[in-house]
Image (tube, grey):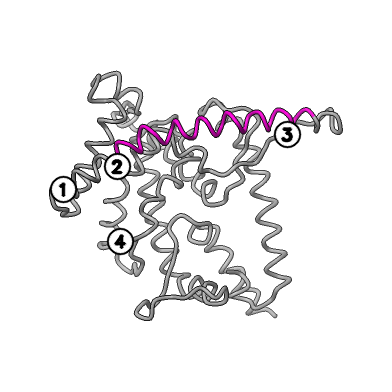
Amino acid sequence: MVYAVTKNFWFAVAFSWIIFAVVLKVADLAAPYIQKQYNLKGISFPHVAGLAWTPIAIMVNWVVDRIPGLRKVEFNAEKIQKRFGAFGEPVVLGFILGLVIGILAGYSPDKVLSLSVNVAAAMVLLPKMIDVLIEGLITVRDAAEKQLKVWFPDREFYIGMDTALLIGNPSVLATGLLLIPIAIVLALILPGNSMLPFADLASLTFILALVTPFVRQNMFKMLIVGTLSIIVILYVGSDISPFFTQSATMANIKLPADFSGIGSMTGAASSWIGWVAVKVGQLFNSIV
């Protein structure tokens, strides 16, 4: 997208290198918190689209912890399950969330039921599928670490992974579902917004996966972080949509004729980092 702004290949490459280097360092700093919260070892997540929202999570956690009353509000999937018994099980919670979302969307009864069953299945199966994947990755990580220790005995290494490994967390899944109607309402009521969420609504969990450790899996704080992040995304997406659309056109992606522009809610481009990249590119154009 920087290239779409500047039309300068080497500047775009250099800027990408800088972002990549910064993200690798930030991922290393965040790794101990993420590993502890998700019970992982030797893994980091150099994922711009996820790490971009950790500053908001740290800020929200700090502010909420200093507000009497609000700081006592704490719930996550485990506590819900413990308090409500069978009604707090992921399968039941997913069914209820699917039911509510389907009703709010105005679906017919059969589609509401179908959505509820699908969400319930996702709440149960996705974590188990990811657990199997992680088990295999740990074997690979251990072998890689053993060899790297031979070459660099005094260094610690993390295997960089994608945030998709973390979205199976029940708190992340449940909060991501709750953010879907919030994102739609915000898109309709925010003044100056021209971005309408659609396909990316199913991927809102990616916003939450890396912020979860910094709010201790508190779904109340996760909901606040997610809401604030969506507000930023909508305004950033509206502002950079011409460049995002131009990038897609340059990549020979066919766009519908009746669309004035496109954007993304969960990619790095529509984060505040993507906005900074565009503004730096525009500054470069004004100087050169």
Which quadrant would the N terminus be assigned to in this image? bottom right
Residue with the mark numbered 4: 187
Between the C-alphas of marks 3 and 4, the distance is 41 Å
Badge 3 is on which residue?
157
**What residue is rendered at 67% in x and 37% in y?**
159
- Residue 31: image quadrant is top right
The x and y percentages for residue 268 are: 53, 57
Q: Residues within 10 Å of mark 2 (few under 14, many from 20)?
A: some
Left or right, residue 9 beside residue 212: right
Q: Which residue matches tag 2? A: 118
Measured in 3D between alpha carbons, the distance from the residue under mark 2 to the one under mark 3, in whole angstroms, is 39 Å
Q: Residue furthest left?
A: 109
Q: Residues within 10 Å of mark 3 (few under 14, many from 20)?
A: some
Tell me, yes or no, whether the highlighted magenta stretch contains residue 259. no
* Magenta span: 119-146
The residue wearing badge 1 is 110
Judged from the image, the secondary structure of the residue bearing numbered disc 4 is helix
The answer to whether 49 is drawn above or below residue 178 in the figure is: below
Closer to the eye: label 2 or 3: 2
The x, y position of residue 251, in whole percent, is: 57, 73
Q: Quadrant of residue 118?
A: top left
- The kind of residue on which mark 4 rests is Ala
Q: Residue at x 38, y 31 (%)?
A: 218
